[in-house]
Image: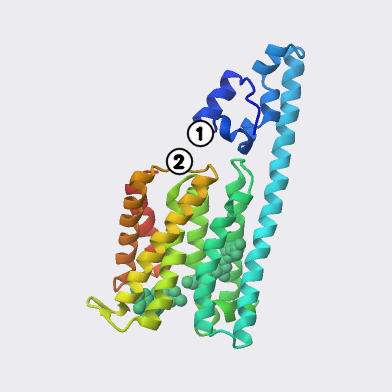
Amino acid sequence: MAANLPLSPITHHFCLRSGFGSRALTTHRFCSPSFLISSPCFIGLTGLGSASQLRARRSLISSAVATNSMLHDVGATVAVLGGAYALVVSFESLTKRNVIQQSLSRKLVHILSGLLFVLAWPIFSGSSEARYFAAFVPLVNGLRLVINGLSLSPNSTLIKSVTREGRPEELLKGPLFYVLALLISVVFFWRDSPIGMMSLAMMCGGDGIADIMGRKYGSVKIPYNPRKSWAGSISMFIFGFSISIGLLYYYSSLGYLDMNWGTTFQRVAIVSMVATVVESLPITDQLDDNVSVPLATILAAYLSFGN
Ligand SMILES: Nc1ccn([C@@H]2O[C@H](COP(=O)(O)OP(=O)(O)OP(=O)(O)O)[C@@H](O)[C@H]2O)c(=O)n1
Ligand SMILES: C/C(=C\CO)CCC[C@H](C)CCC[C@H](C)CCCC(C)C
């Protein structure tokens, strides 16, 4: 627990404005004890040196903190990139050994990649640049998909675990749109907004489960779209809603979100319903689900929660 150190007016205003009150001082680099000790107000109170000496000390501490954050984020990026590679290789191995079918492998990679990516966001530092380090992961995977999709250097592992029929050009559709959705969520919304994480909950968790449950139990089709079923859509709503609530609770408990739980359940239910209805529409040939579902979720969540 950080000591309640006296803050310089600027630091105090910044820490409180950015929602980092005393309980979260240790979670944000500009409100961490090392930065506070260097603030002129604290030093002025304790008479620890001339103002110019103290400013020099403060800039030294600030650059040390910035370097520390960058090394932290480089490590987190390498770890998450390794996790992404390990996930794809693992499912390719299961498919190659006929432990699971290729279609199920693709859906499990669809469900797990994005959700594990969102769950990994807190391992990045509290710096304002952290989101761009995190964005490097979908960016690299997007480039992998393009390079393999154009058969510039075919990678059978990726093609086996991520395509329906083993054709490289498939990588340039659903999987590429999927990775772009991850990139947009992390860069524009990150962990301090419910919008990005909800769009991934519906695209990864909801749409992924809809496919698995729909193929298995989807005998009763939706009247306006015979390619989709009530079982698939109801599953999408239930799992998308549940995963969204789980992610919002996860990020609230870590101090990144401050949700009004009296209204959050209804708002999430509305957003989940909008995403589920959009996914059920007969527009897949014109607009991939990995575009329509996250877009619909982002719009509905923005209107429901604000930015
Ligand atoms: N609401 C839904 C969604 C999917 N499905 C079942 O799951 C299959 C694939 O669904 P879809 O979401 O269209 O998967 P694709 O996007 O085509 O596959 P991928 O995401 O792997 O590209 C459908 O043909 C259908 O049998 C369903 O019954 N009801
Ligand atoms: C099959 C897919 C979509 C079709 O609907 C998913 C494609 C997934 C990519 C090939 C890999 C994406 C990896 C993520 C960017 C990072 C995951 C990190 C996590 C820790 C495993």
| Residue 296 visible | yes
Q: Secondary structure at mark 2?
A: loop
**Residue 264 drawn above or below residue 9:** below
Q: Secondary structure at mark 1?
A: loop
Mark 2 → mark 1, Cα distance in angstroms: 9 Å
- Tell me the amino acid under the disc marked 1: Gly
- Tell me the amino acid under the disc marked 2: Asp
Report the residue at 69% width, 12% height from top.
44
Report the residue at 54% width, 57% height from top.
118
Report the residue at 65% width, 68% height from top.
85
Work out which quarter of the rendered image holds the N terminus and state it: top right
> Within the image, what quadrant is residue 287 found in?
bottom left
Q: x, y percentage for residue 128?
A: 59, 41
C-beta proximity under 8 Å, tags 2 and 1: yes
**Residue 156 drawn above or below residue 50:** below
State which image quarter holds ligand 1.
Answer: bottom left
| Residue 173 visible | no
Q: Nearer the viewer, residue 144 or 186?
A: 186
Q: x, y percentage for residue 59?
A: 72, 27
Disc 1 marks which residue? 19
Q: Which mark is residue 258?
A: 2
Q: x, y percentage for residue 279?
A: 34, 68
Q: Is residue 135 left or right of residue 67?
A: left
Q: x, y percentage for residue 290?
A: 43, 67
Q: Residues within 10 Å of mark 2 (few under 14, many from 20)?
A: some
Q: Which mark is residue 126?
A: none
